[in-house]
Image (cartoon, rainbow, N blue to C red):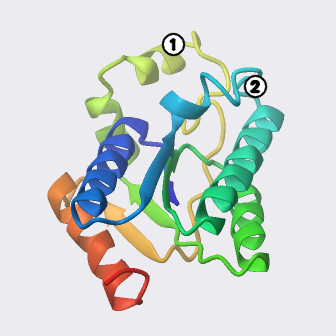
Amino acid sequence: MIRKAEQTIQSTIACALEQHLLHLHKFVYRLDGDNVRFGLNKDLGFDEKSRNENIRRIGEVSKLFADSACIVVTAFISPYLVDRAVARELHLKAGIPFIEVFVDAPLHVVEERDPKGLYKKARAGEIKDFTGISAPYEAPENPEIHIKTHETDVTESVRIITEYLVANHYIS
């Protein structure tokens, strides 16, 4: 599970990781806002209750994929510790590994990278409940992997995650 408020770079890393694992002939699928928010979760907004339900549903779908021996890479803004804990517990109770990757960057860096101008709109009050601006983001306390994107590029990020998977015998 890749989690963080920096959606663009996070999705880029998730996509690159999925492609890398596919090249290694691994059964892998990526879930992100593009393929979940516009289908399964199109009835949800961005308030706290909707965000809770979004992550709960993603956790359930991820578990189903993983139960079929698929490596599931998720790239979602998951701002609350409790939601991530629920997703982790759901997997662990089913005997399915859960690896949290904290894709991290200082807020000023995220705002500089913002291609859609969403942070600017959020600061101007045009977007309500925007993670990191008008809504909280609770950083992971003990992620298995911590990627600092202001120090690490996409290729290096994929290498770090892949090395973790190999070292911990999730893939060979």
Marks 1 and 2, Cα distance to the nearest angstrom?
A: 24 Å
Amino acid under disc 1: Ala
Q: Is residue 111 above or below residue 152?
A: above
Q: Is residue 146 above or below residue 154?
A: below
* Residue marked by disc 2: 44
Residue 171 spot, x, y in % from top left: 37, 80
Amino acid under disc 2: Leu
How dense is the environment of label 1, judged by Cα within 10 Å: few (below 14), some, or many (20 and up)?
few
* Residue marked by disc 1: 124
Q: Earlier in the sequence, mark 1 or mark 2?
A: 2
Q: Residue at x 35, y 32 (%)?
A: 111
Q: Residue at x 73, y 23 (%)?
A: 45
Residue 6 spot, x, y in % from top left: 42, 42
Kindly indicate the quadrant of the structure image that contains residue 59: bottom right
Q: In the depicted view, which residue is nearer to us: 22 or 88?
A: 22
Q: Residue at x 59, y 15 (%)?
A: 127
